[in-house]
Amino acid sequence: MRNNLLPAVHKRLAQFNFENFFAGFNSSVDESVLPLHIAKRIYNFNISDGTLSDGYGMARDSRFPIAATNIWNYRFWHEESKSHRNILMASHTNGEIRFLPHGERNLTRLVGVQFTSTPIAVNYRLFGEDVILMTSETDGMFVWNGRDAAYKIEGAPSIRTLTMHFERMFVTTAGEANAVYFSDDLDPTNWGMELNEGGFIQFMDEMGSSNKVISFLNHVYVFRDYGISRITAFGDQSEFSATNLFTSSGRIYGKTPTACGDRIMFLASDGIYMFDGISTIPVAGHLKGLIKHSPNAVATYHDGKYFLSLNLDIGTPSADNRNNSFISIDLKSGLVNVTHGIGPTAFNSIDGNLFAISHGTIGTINNSARNAGDIALRKSYVSPLIDLGTDEIKTIREFYIDSTVPFQLTLFSETTSRTLSVTPRVGITRLRMNFRGRKLGFAIETTATGGRLTRPGVRFSI
């Protein structure tokens, strides 16, 4: 007997589970070559524990109700209490210095000190007394011992950056910046140019200005526009010498080189680098596709992580090259977290807290995923748009996830997209659907805080 029935068409069913989010994202390659478990972009989520949880935010510090440009800590020995004490100090945008006296919550103005550009500061034991040295590119150096009136050091250079090395202060200066100056031995307030006092080392080559100095592994390393030089400075200054170590193909952003334990991290126009005193290697290469021109980038080292504020191509990058984001790189695990919507102009790790200044507001970095404690940052996870190795039509039949916060799920193909508002259920939340395309991807976005999303997965037919 003839069989006139058409054979049944059996669609192939497939399933993909995301066990964790440790794979992170990669913005440096075309998304079409990424596997599904590596995202195209993640920001304002923290992936350090393998889930999507609240990323970094900034909490406003109510003790500093001023518009500020920098913040630092003055640490000194208090003879009466036989203990170390701390005084938090900040520079106002009007050039004044404000500080919090020990045990008080009201700011006091430091009389006799006025800056016309952003100051930096360093603690030093000068002639047996703990003092704070404050200096800027345009105003010279001021010294304060916490009790008496602050005074200015005449003859100090216009200092851009500084480092203490074997009881001398080494500095880069404003202007042409083709030299590194150093103070007298045991006296960073003496800048006389005699052989038994201070001096300078001049660089006459094509590596550009000297932008930052760092004392590291018994040498002074000078980070210049297009390279790194090393100054060997032991004992008598007549034996000081300088050597060029590294020539960069990209411009090094001068405020980003930071000593991070046994290495120095820095940002250049062609990526992020790690320097160990001899060799330089690129790191966090998956960020290269996001990094824009960042002349105002700043960085610090805190809690085993390199924190870097810069301009990223997320949403609308800053047209005037201002910092619009910051990243943290865990130097042990290599994990990178991106925070978008907060672009600090200054960082300082003080007594276990990471202070930051954003739009003049002083705050501390935390895991709130909020800007200055008021505005919830939008957290986003975007998968690549991929064809799963076949040009056939794929249909997403089900999306599932373990979530404790509501979120928006967007499914997208090469031609269309669909957005769903999802209120999670206890346990696994399952969404049945019928979304088709040759290339498929999905995005998760939320402003809800205090929860986490984990172990998503998709079931699809081909």
Image (spheres, rainbow, N blue to C red):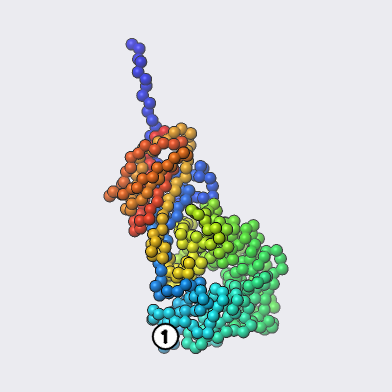
Q: Tell me the residue at 48%/67% (across/down).
A: 359
Q: In the image, is residue 348 above or below residue 167?
A: above
Pinpoint residue 98: horizontal percent, then vertical percent.
Answer: 47, 79
Residue 106's place in the image compared with 380, above or below, is below
330 vs 112, nearest the viewer:
112
Q: Which image quadrant: the N terminus?
A: top left
| Occupied quadrant, residue 151 | bottom right
Residue lying furthest left in this view? Answer: 426
Disc 1 secondary structure class: loop
What residue do we see at 44% from left, 82% from top?
108
Relative to 35, say whether 355 is above or below. Answer: below
- Quarter of the C terminus within the rendering: top left
Report which quarter residue 179 is drawn in: bottom right
Q: Judge the density around disc 1: few (<14), some (14-19), many (≥20) Cα neighbours within 10 Å.
A: few
Any part of residue 272 in sight: no
Residue 402 image position (x, y, % from top left): 33, 49
x and y, in percent, of residue 381 in the image: 43, 50
Taking the spot 51% from the left edge, 42% from the top edge, the residue there is 32
Q: For this rendering, which residue is in front, 71 or 23? A: 71
Q: Quadrant of residue 86?
A: bottom left
230 vs 51, nearest the viewer: 51
Look at mark 1 in the image and give the residue it sits on. Answer: 82
Q: Is residue 316 left or right of residue 245?
A: left
Q: Residue furthest top?
A: 1
Count numbered badges in the picture.
1
Q: Is residue 452 visible?
A: yes
The spot of residue 300 in percent (x, y) is: 51, 67
Identify the amino acid type marked 1: Lys
Residue at image location 42% in from the left, 42% down from the top: 417
